[in-house]
Amino acid sequence: MQELNHQINFILELDKLKAIYRKALIRADKNRYENSAEHSWHIALTAHVLAPYANATVDIHRVCLMLLIHDIVEIDAGDTFAFDHHTILGQQAEKEAAAAERIFGLLPSPQRETMIALWHEFEQAETADAQFAKAIDRILPLIQNMQNEGGSWVQNKVFKHQVIKRNQYLETAAPKLWQYVLEQIDIAEDRGWLRRD
């Protein structure tokens, strides 16, 4: 029962992710801000749908689990905007590492170690699974912003080169999706949704 209690405590802690809001706007819901739990669910399904575009053989179960857990650390660390100043983003990495230890530490062993290792694998993006997961984490906000006439790009005056750099995981992880992204970025620039370099 002690192991189950630890697991239940972890599950209850996850509920807090629903209160972490991102910069992504949900057009279907009067442009309210998306929460991190919604984002995690959305990208996990997106990974399943777009799995055929992976350049390497990937274990979609591992990819989806990475995507479901990658933002759990925001419970403690909060969310940062993808295009924030590099100093802010650098400080965020330390906060997130500490949060991973605390939150996944609620789980009993060996689940604790498995989740922490998977979270680190996603962050380091050195394996095919992690690179594809990162690519999917990057492409979904682009899709959302394109559907929403620039959405958070327009609000935050994002430059074209920033979005290209942010999505570069796709170049090797999913080349066909990379081509799609480049086309969408050009459209966004032409429509004034992204600032010209």
Image: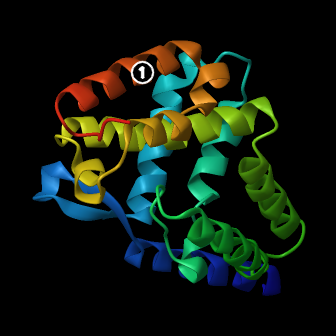
Which quadrant of the rendered structure holds the N terminus? Answer: bottom right
Q: Relative to 20, is 71 on the left or the right?
A: right
Which residue occupies 48% across, 73% down?
A: 17
Give the color scheme: rainbow, by chain, secondary structure or one colour: rainbow
175 vs 144, left or right, is: right
Q: Is residue 144 above or below residue 41?
A: above
Q: Relative to residue 60, is residue 125 depicted above or below?
A: below
Q: How many marks?
A: 1
Residue 188, quarter of picture: top left
How crowded pointer 1 is (Cα within 10 Å; few <14, some 14-19, many 20+) is rated as some
Quadrant that contains the C terminus: top left
The amino acid pointed to by label 1 is Leu
Q: Residue at x 62, y 32 (%)?
A: 169
- Horizontal and vertical percent for residue 24? 32, 56
Q: Position of residue 151 (x, y in %)?
A: 23, 49
Locate residue 167, reporting x and y percent: 52, 35
Q: Secondary structure at mark 1?
A: helix
| Residue at the image position 79 percent from the left and 79 percent from the top | 105
Horizontal side of residue 123 vs 109, given as left or right: left
Return the residue at label 1: 182
Q: Is residue 185 visible?
A: yes
**Going by the image, does 165 lie left or right of 182?**
right
Q: Is residue 72 visible?
A: no
Q: Quadrant of residue 172?
A: top right
Can you give x and y, in whole percent of width and height, for residue 85 in the image? 52, 64
- The residue at 79%/56% (across/down) is 120
Q: Residue furthest left?
A: 30
